[in-house]
């Protein structure tokens, strides 16, 4: 096992507690997302991307307290019809506040 293999295994997606959500219906608010995902565990932070008019850009990030909660959320929410769109959910490394999205 070389250093690259060690680095990759330490960043295994199954250990990520943050989620990337895409294909979000424009009518779905950040509060609605929090309500939908809070049943899987404690949410530490959330961010729904919005354009200059304050309208949803169709993607968001949610960070859970635990990786297990994130895994359950992906398992149950990915592919769900929310509003008029099928939601896409995957694990992602934590997105730092202030990072340009």
Image (cartoon, helix red, strand yellow):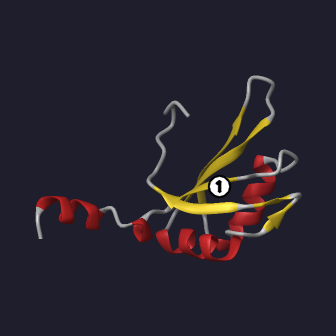
What quarter of the picture does the C terminus occupy? top right
Q: Specify the farthest residue to the top.
A: 52
Number of marks present in the image shown: 1
From this view, report whether residue 61 is shown above or below residue 17: above
Q: Nearer the viewer, residue 35 or 25?
A: 25
> Looking at the image, is 1 positioned above or below residue 11?
below
Residue 71 horizontal side relative to residue 32, left or right: left
- Badge 1: few (under 14), some or many (20 or more) residues near its Cα, within 10 Å? many
Q: Is residue 30 above or below residue 50?
A: below
Residue drawn at point x = 67 percent, y = 61 percent: 88
The quarter of the picture where residue 42 lies is: bottom right
Q: Residue 77: image x %, image y %?
A: 70, 70
Left or right, 88 with respect to 5, comes to: right
Q: Residue 65, percent across and down?
A: 52, 63
Going 43% across and 71% down the picture, which residue do you hit? 14
Which residue ends up furthest to the left in the rendered image? Answer: 2
Left or right: where 8 falls relative to 73: left
Image quarter of residue 38: bottom right
Q: Position of residue 84 (x, y in %)?
A: 88, 57
User: Is residue 86 rendered to the left or right of residue 71?
Assistant: right
Q: Quadrant of residue 71?
A: bottom right
Q: Return the x and y of residue 66 as percentages of the image width and height.
A: 49, 68
Q: Residue at position x 46%, y 40% from top?
A: 96
Q: Name the residue under label 1.
A: 21
Quadrant where the N terminus lies? Answer: bottom left
SS at mark 1?
strand
């Amino acid at each position: 096992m070389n250093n690259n293999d060690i680095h990759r295994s330490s960043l295994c997606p199954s250990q990520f507690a943050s989620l990337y959500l895409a294909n979000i219906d424009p009518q779905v608010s950040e509060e609605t997302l929090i309500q939908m995902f809070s049943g899987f565990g404690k949410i530490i932070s959330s961010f729904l991307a919005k354009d200059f008019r304050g309208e949803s850009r169709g993607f968001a990030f949610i960070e859970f307290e635990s990786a297990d909660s994130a895994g359950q959320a992906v398992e149950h929410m990915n592919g769900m019809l929310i509003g008029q769109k099928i939601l896409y959910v995957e694990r992602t490394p934590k997105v730092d506040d202030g990072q340009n999205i």
